[in-house]
Every structure is written in structure tokens, then in C-alpha cells.
Amino acid sequence: MSEIEIKNLTKRFQVKGHTVTALEHINLNIEKGEIFGIIGMSGAGKSTLVRSINYLEKPTEGQVLIDGVDLSDLSTKELRKKRSEIGMIFQGFHLLEQKNVLDNVCFPLRISGVGRKEAKDKARALLKTVNLEEKEKAYPSQLSGGQKQRVAIARALATEPKILLCDEATSALDPQTTESILALLKQINENLGITIVIITHQMSVVTDICQKVAIIDNGNLVEQGSVKEIFAHPTSDAAKELIFGTRPSPLSVREVSGNKTVRVVFGGGSSYEPVIANAILRFQVPINILHADTRNVGGKAVGEMVLGLPEGEKIQEDITAFLRERGLTVTEVDEHVN
């Protein structure tokens, strides 16, 4: 049984007399202990989806089950208790500005009835977990963005949740700080076994720490699977936009290169071999590199290139076969790629 099951979820809003469908017929299973990414561009519906997981947004249709329990079957009191098993952190941190760091982490403990001393002891332990114990007397205004997010993570962990929802938790942070927060989340997942759901529009966040990913586009789930597989073989326009950095456009890369264009994805040993240079030497023809990049996908270096192959169907087939024989993933590209 999946820890989180989303079945045929639809969410509609009434806006100025009009019905707006934010999500339509979403089906997802998230297993216990996974780091699962939900990615899409702004307005795609991903934040509505994550807020539906803990019923901050009640679905118009469909079901959300946590450990097999349908949240729609729970009373208000039962739902409040179930929500205590689901921590949440936000892009805007949502800290109490008038309270210091220690009191911010204590806050959910105090409102749940934990005594002052016990709450402070536990809060101090959590601040140590997020490497912020020396800031317990500081106020949010005295902290950097990364430090504020660490406080928010410690506060989210205070009720010992089984699930941690991260809604654009790194979007307001610089790349170096983002990297440190993602490393912290990965450490929490490994040490505590907490299931983490990350909502983001940044493909780099997904490739850094997520095992599986779902792609939302205009309220629809257009693609889902392992991060490695989707990075290597994106099929939806939304996935290609997030990976390539652009939507398909009328200008084809074939027009840019003049010939057949392929995307090559490589990792492991192949990333250290001069495969393209060897292909040029082998076939004695030019191969045009239109785009190249290297990313961390699941902790491993994975590279991609978009290549313009020379004219001639036979030579194109021979080069493609040569690349595949060396463990590279090769797919034809029909759209413009930045």
C-alpha cells in the first residue's frame, strides 16, 4: 500500500462567476520513504495539489488517502490529528517575526499541549538537526533566507511527521543555499525515513534529490516515473520545456542544423569517454554540437548533448548505432532547443 494515494482528484474554484479547473483527474501513488518531486511551471496547479494532500484544499472530486485512510471520511478533530503527521514548509518561510528561533520551533509543540520545558528541549534538539543551535535566541529578521528555511524545517519536524511537504521551499534561495537545503532534506529523509514531497518549478531540484517525479501542466498530470527515465526520455511538451528550457516552437532544430538532430544522454563510464570525438574519427564526418550540459541526477553525473548529424540516412543510422552501442540514450529531436 502506498503511503499517499491520490485517486481521480479534481479541484475547481469559482472566480468572479466563472469555474476554473485547477486540477483534473490526478492519479498518483507515493511510496513510504520516497523523495517525490511534483514539478510544473507557474500556474500549472502543483501548489493546489500539495495543499490537497493535507486537505488545506478540499478536492472537488476524488480521494486523498494517507496510509489507506480517506481524508474525506475524517471528522474535523480526526483530520486535525492526521495533519499533525504531515509537516509543511513554504517558499515564504511563514515564521513568527515577534518570536525568536527557539520559540518558533516550540510553537507547534505548545499548541499541541506539550509542556514548556519539554518543548524547548525538543526544539533545541531539532535546531541541532538543522545545524542552527547557535541561533536559538535570534529573531527571523536577523537570519538569512537559508537560515529561515532551516528554522521552518525544524518547526515542521517538531510534531514528528511521517510526511514532509515542501511547497517551492528553495525558490527564494540562491543556488548555493538551495544546495545546502536540499542536502539537509536528503539527510532528514535518510536518517528519519520521512516521506518528502517537493513541489518546484526547478528541474535542478528534482534531479538533485528526487527518486520519482510527476509533471503537472495546466492542471493535468502529463508524465510521471523515475527521474532518470524522464530525464533521458521526456515525452510531454511540459517535460521537454523543463529539461530543455523552452517549449516546442515553430523553428525546428533541424532547420538550425540543416540535418537530422538527436539528443544524447550519457552517464557513468560513458561520461568520461570521448564518444563524440571517437565517432568523428570513426566515420570521418563532422558532427555539430548544438547544446551540451551536465547535471546531477540521483547523485550521479549525467550529461546531455543535442547533436546535428551530417546528411545521409545511412551515415545517420550508423552514427546513432555507434552511440547506442556505447551505452548512450539517443532520441531524435524535432523541436527547438536552447
Image (spheres, helix red, strand yellow):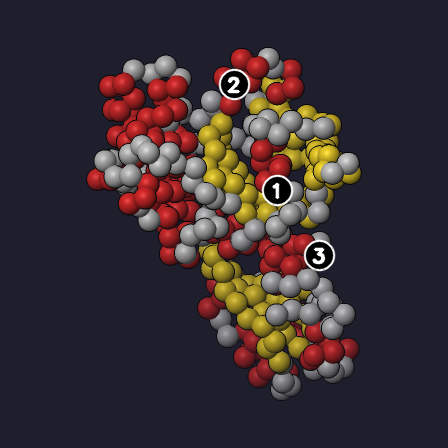
Quadrant where the N terminus sits is top right
| Image position, residue 59 (x, y; %) | 68, 28
Asked if the residue at tag 1 contacts the one at tag 3, i.e. Cβ–Cβ closer than 8 Å, the answer is: no
Q: CA distance from mark 3 to mark 2?
A: 39 Å
Task: Say whether residue 55 is left or right of residue 119.
Answer: right
Mark 3: amino acid? Asp
Q: Residue at x 49, y 60 (%)?
A: 295
Q: Dot 2 corresponds to which residue?
A: 80
- Give the mark nearest the N terminus, 3 or 2: 2
Mark 1: amino acid? Lys
Label for residue 46? 1
| Image position, residue 278 (x, y; %) | 55, 78
* Front-most of residues 267 and 307: 307
Mark 2: amino acid? Arg
Q: Against 238, is 122 above or below?
A: above
Q: Quadrant of residue 161?
A: top left
Q: Residue at x 52, y 67 (%)?
A: 293
Q: CA distance from mark 2 to mark 1?
A: 23 Å
Q: Dot 3 corresponds to which residue?
A: 237
The secondary structure type at the circle numbered 1 is: helix
The secondary structure type at the circle numbered 3 is: helix
